[in-house]
Amino acid sequence: MNSSPLQKGLEWVYQNFKKNTATMLVLTGTIGWGLSSLAQVGAVLFNPKIQKEQKGFLVPQALLDAAVNIGCFFAITQSAKKIISKLASTGKIAPSKVRTFLNKNKDLYGDKVGKLSLDLDEVIKQDPKFPKESYYSYKNYVTTMGTIGASILSSNIVTPILRNSMASDMQKKYLDKRPQPLPSSGSMKI
């Protein structure tokens, strides 16, 4: 049976992200911010109602917004994903089945739980009794929830604060560079 390119693409996405939804969220969120930013810049550039002088200010501001939006989103969500994933792979945070397994095997893993020296992804490869389904579903869940939380933090708190601060500085510089109108002779008071 021949699959359409769309079906093949969807199958590829499923196979690559079924155990790592958080990575898909980071990638799609970053791509979304990029496309949104591109649309914003295009709207300013191609709007005939905006004067050229205003475009000289608005386009750089939209590009700065894009850099802040994309940079903050990616940095914060990717960092949160990595930290939470590491906490799960060291056993620092783990579902009850994994904790039970680690407690039953204290001689092998007891003093390593929660430390960087323990990598449960490697333990899975070496020990067939490890509850891997429980571990993988839990790790996927906590990294996904952490990534969603980080994206909310980034998009709704950090990014607006940084963007507004930078836009304010940019506007002050722009206004300072503009030629000041000369006072008319009739408006001077003696």
Image: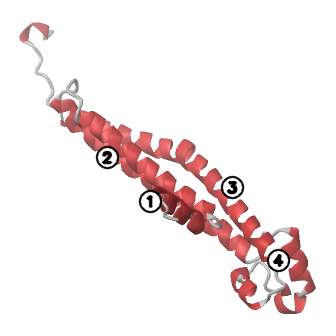
Q: CA distance from mark 3 to mark 2?
A: 30 Å
| Mark 3 vs 1, N-terminal side | 1
- The kind of secondary structure element at disc 3 is helix
From the viewer's perspective, tell me whether residue 5 is left or right of residue 18: left
Q: What's the residue type where badge 2 is placed?
A: Leu
Q: What's the residue type where badge 1 is placed?
A: Pro
In the rendered image, residue 45, in percent from the top left (x then y), is placed at 23, 37
Residue extending farthest left = 185
Q: CA distance from mark 1 to mark 2?
A: 34 Å
Residue extending farthest top = 186
Q: Residue at x 70, y 83 (%)?
A: 119
Task: Please indicate, yes or no, whether residue 59 appears anywhere in the rendered image.
Answer: yes
In the rendered image, residue 107, in percent from the top left (x then y), is placed at 88, 92
Q: What's the residue type where badge 3 is placed?
A: Met
- The kind of secondary structure element at disc 1 is helix
Q: Residue at x 27, y 43 (%)?
A: 60
**Which is in the foreground here, disc 3 or disc 2?**
3
| Mark 4 vs 3, N-terminal side | 4
Q: Quadrant of residue 47?
A: top left
Q: What's the residue type where badge 4 is placed?
A: Pro
Give above or below for 112 relative to 153: below
Q: Residues within 10 Å of mark 2 (few under 14, many from 20)?
A: some
In the rendered image, residue 43, in percent from the top left (x then y), is placed at 29, 34
Q: Residue 63, which numbered label?
A: 2
- The kind of secondary structure element at disc 2 is helix
Q: Residues within 10 Å of mark 3 (few under 14, many from 20)?
A: some
Q: Residue at x 43, y 43 (%)?
A: 163
Q: Are marks 3 and 1 in contact (CB under 8 Å)?
A: no
Quadrant of image for the C terminus: top left
The residue singled out by tag 1 in the image is: 5
The residue singled out by tag 3 in the image is: 145
| Mark 2 vs 4, N-terminal side | 2
